[in-house]
Amino acid sequence: MVIVPWQCHLPDGSVRTGGPPPPILFPGSFNPLHDGHRALAGLAAARLSGMVAFELSVANVDKPDLTADEVRRRLDQFRDRAVVFVTRAPTFVAKAALFPGTTFVVGADTAARVVHPRYYGGAADMARALDAIRGRGCRFFVGGRVDPDGRFVDVAGVAVPETYRDLFAGPAEAEFRVDVSSTALRQGPG
């Protein structure tokens, strides 16, 4: 059996492996894909001058692995719309190893986790991880999000250590704000 690091699902439903890494990649769970994802992808494509592909990881640091049926259900949302890479890369260090030179499109909530020492076992391990991401030529394009306290946080509001500030860029609130979340959509009205 051959194990591939990723599968690339094209909008027409075909699948390929191999090839160059995407220059811009938007990782997420996309449960469901919504207007905020599409708007941020569109802005990233315009600002970074390239096509945005999406990434769905079967493995996630904070959630159980996705079943094959769940992966298919989530991929269906992208049919005739976008390229999706399916991986088993739960961390950005792993994503950077698979996709060197890529700019990752993330929300401010994800960016805050990328620079939070608890996800690494401490500040020294976090620094090693961010150094590895930088060493692979990867960066982050960060879209603002409303935090649990109801405040809007854009890239400037993420507590990125000064040493790594150059890895994170993104629009200010005046340029991008879409107050929708997959969690809220799953929970429905009320």
Image: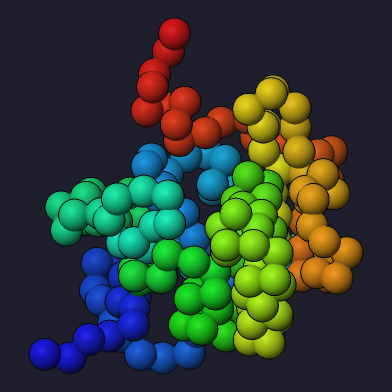
Residue 169 versus residue 110 in the image, above or below: below
Q: Is residue 53 left or right of residue 175?
A: left
At horizontal 63% and vertical 27% (from top left) the residue drawn is 148
Residue 118 versus residue 84 in the image, above or below: above
Residue at the top extreme?
190
Whole-percent x and y of residue 89? 41, 70
Residue 66 sits in quarter: bottom left
At horizontal 80% and vertical 69% (from top left) the residue drawn is 164
Foreground of the two, 84 or 166: 166
At horizontal 25% and vertical 76% (from top left) the residue drawn is 15
Quarter the C terminus occupies: top left
Whole-percent x and y of residue 111? 66, 54
Q: Is residue 188 left or right of residue 3?
A: right
Residue 177 sits in quarter: top right
Whole-percent x and y of residue 36? 57, 40
Foreground of the two, 125 or 26: 125
The number of callouts visible is 0
Residue at the right extreme?
162
Q: Is residue 20 left or right of residue 130?
A: left
